[in-house]
Image (cartoon, rainbow, N blue to C red):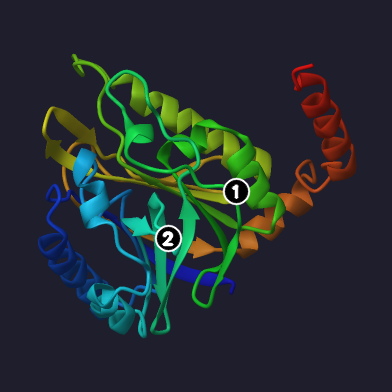
Amino acid sequence: MLHATMRIAQTGSVLANFNENLERHCLVIENAIRDGADAVAFPELSLTGYNVQDAAQDIAMHIEDARLDPLRELSRKICIICGGIELSNDYGVYNSAFMFEDGRGESIHRKIYLPTYGMFEELRYFSAGQHIRAVDSKRLGRIGVAICEDFWHVSVPYLLAQQGAKMLVALMSSPLRMSPGSGKPAIVSQWETIAGTYAFLFSTYVACVNRTGNEDSFTYWGNSSLTGPDGKLIAEAPLFREKFLDVALDFTEVKRTRLHSSHFLDEDLRLFASELRHIVKKSRPD
């Protein structure tokens, strides 16, 4: 896969209303298909809303749940990446990223780092994911998907890139943490730095898909973006309002960037693994 067009759906969600959110997803996807997009990506927990709290267990569904059939059917014409609450085979409840393509659905990432500080309390309602795996998409090639706080831990995008992901996708429900004031909120600048740094260091595309709207006391700031493998911003959506951002992906740019500078390819994984084992061994309690 050398070229693709992805629609970043910077939208909001209705809290704990799967049916309404699904209907909205289908409309957005149908429009993306009509406009010739190869893929469409939605924010974190786009099918349920973010602050579900105790309702998480009631809303959780297995990836094979028949209620997801409309997405499976639409995926025969487009790749769909979205966020939902997953019920695992052993009845764990996860904040997950789903991918639907060619009539099939799979859970491709379970959020690992569940923030439970300040306004956040995810660890009370979700189990933490235990795996970091890049996945193959017929329409996007090899990609790595992570969920919001996961991107604040360099190990997640690093391991996705080392598994061959040419694009990293961060599904987000990032709220303001204080009044925005007159300038750009600090959290926006922090995410810009994160996206640009990973894109440059790993020579990959980085797509940030954030939501908008208000939910309980949370205000989501949007500003979804695509950063190129040279670390430069390619496109961004506005702050605070819904936007469907169409971005062109030319994966020969990953090749060009890595031929220009092989810093990512020069990573010594054996050294890294050896030193990490040493650190883990030393950190074990006596």
Q: How many marks?
A: 2
Q: Which mark is residue 86?
A: none
Direction from residue 202 to residue 20 in the image, left or right: left
Camera-nearest residue between 94 and 270: 94
Residue at figure coordinates x 66%, y 38% from the top left: 201
Label 2 and label 1: CA atoms lie apart by 34 Å
Q: In this rendering, is residue 54 above or below 11?
A: above
Residue where numbered disc 1 is placed: 229
Q: In this rendering, is residue 179 above or below 156?
A: above
Say what amino acid the circle numbered 1 marks: Pro
Dividing the picture into quadrants, the one containing residue 178 is top left
Viewer-nearest of discs 2 and 1 = 2
Residue at figure coordinates x 12%, y 50% from the top left: 14
- Residue 41 seen anywhere in this rendered image of the structure: yes
Q: In this rendering, is residue 72 above or below 239?
A: below
| Secondary structure type for disc 1 | loop
- The picture places residue 260, in percent across and down from the top left corner, at 76, 48
**Quadrant the N terminus occupies:** bottom right
